[in-house]
Amino acid sequence: MINILLITFLITLFYVAIANRLLTYVKVIALQGVLLFAIVFIQLNEINPLNLILILLETIFFKSIAVPVFLAYVIKRNKITREAEPYVSNFMSLIIVTLICVTTILLVNSIKDKELDKIFFVVALSALFTGVYFIISRRKIITHVMGYLIIENGVFILSLAVGSEMTMLVNIGIMLDIFVSVLVLGIFVNRIGDTFEAMNVDNLSNLKD
């Protein structure tokens, strides 16, 4: 069951590569939050009630509800066009993401460790590199925020790959990190929206100290 959920998460990365609509990205981020909760719930052997509530808040409430609603608000607030406007075509993005996944599979298979859960590492590293590529290949600033969230989700899965239990302190650290990052980036996007009519990264070159 966990493998199916991880593969589904991996498929969302391919879907992001070919998507054009910003709201589609928001929906994918929300879906990834649900998948992360399901993966954690099944993967962890022992979950105390407090830790379960914290994971529920972090994945379902924060990643699947609060962040997508906030991003949708930022898009509407700044009247950002629905098109993502990537630097490269969707077909090339799909090929690049595929190469990323294949490379991570080859990399993980080269590691000789019987205790290593390889599928977790493959999905985690694929999410990390796809998030970085997503930031590099998109014009709009808001898509950079979404790319950062994909990287955060990859870090979340990576934390599951290196241990069978997630401490409450780690959960709090990840959640606060995402919250502060999204909040700061959201305010930044709003300020840019007040300054420029378009929300492209190219406009940042016009900023002066």
Image (cartoon, rainbow, N blue to C red):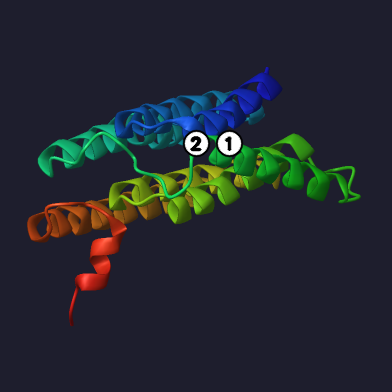
State the residue lying farthest toward the left.
194
Looking at the image, residue 191 sits to the left or right of residue 114; the answer is left
- Local secondary structure at mark 2: helix
Q: Nearer the viewer, residue 146 or 54?
A: 146
Quadrant assignment, res 157: top right
Looking at the image, residue 153 sits to the left or right of residue 201; the answer is right
**Classed neighbour count for the residue bearing mark 2: other residues with Cα under 10 Å, few (<14), some (14–19), many (≥20):** some
Q: Nearer the viewer, residue 45 or 199?
A: 199
Check the image and report above or below for 147 versus 43: below
Amino acid type, callout 1: Leu
Number of numbered labels in the structure image: 2
Amino acid type, callout 2: Asn
Q: CA distance from mark 1 to mark 2?
A: 6 Å
Contact check, label 1 and label 2, Cβ < 8 Å? yes
The residue labelled by disc 1 is 94
Q: Position of residue 156 (x, y in %)?
A: 54, 44
Looking at the image, residue 28 sits to the left or right of residue 109; the answer is left
- Local secondary structure at mark 1: helix
Q: Quadrant of the C terminus?
A: bottom left
Tell me, for residue 90, which label it has, or none. 2
Q: Position of residue 37 (x, y in %)?
A: 50, 28
**Classed neighbour count for the residue bearing mark 1: other residues with Cα under 10 Å, few (<14), some (14–19), many (≥20):** some
Query: Residue placed at 18% from the left, 52% from the top?
Result: 198
Q: Nearer the viewer, residue 75 or 1?
A: 75
Whether residue 199 appears in this view of the structure is yes
Quadrant assignment, res 4: top right
Q: Nearer the viewer, residue 71 or 88?
A: 88
Q: Position of residue 207 (x, y in %)?
A: 19, 73
Q: Position of residue 131 (x, y in %)?
A: 50, 48
Q: Quadrant of the N terminus?
A: top right
Check the image and report above or below for 97 versus 39: below
State the residue lying farthest toward the top.
1
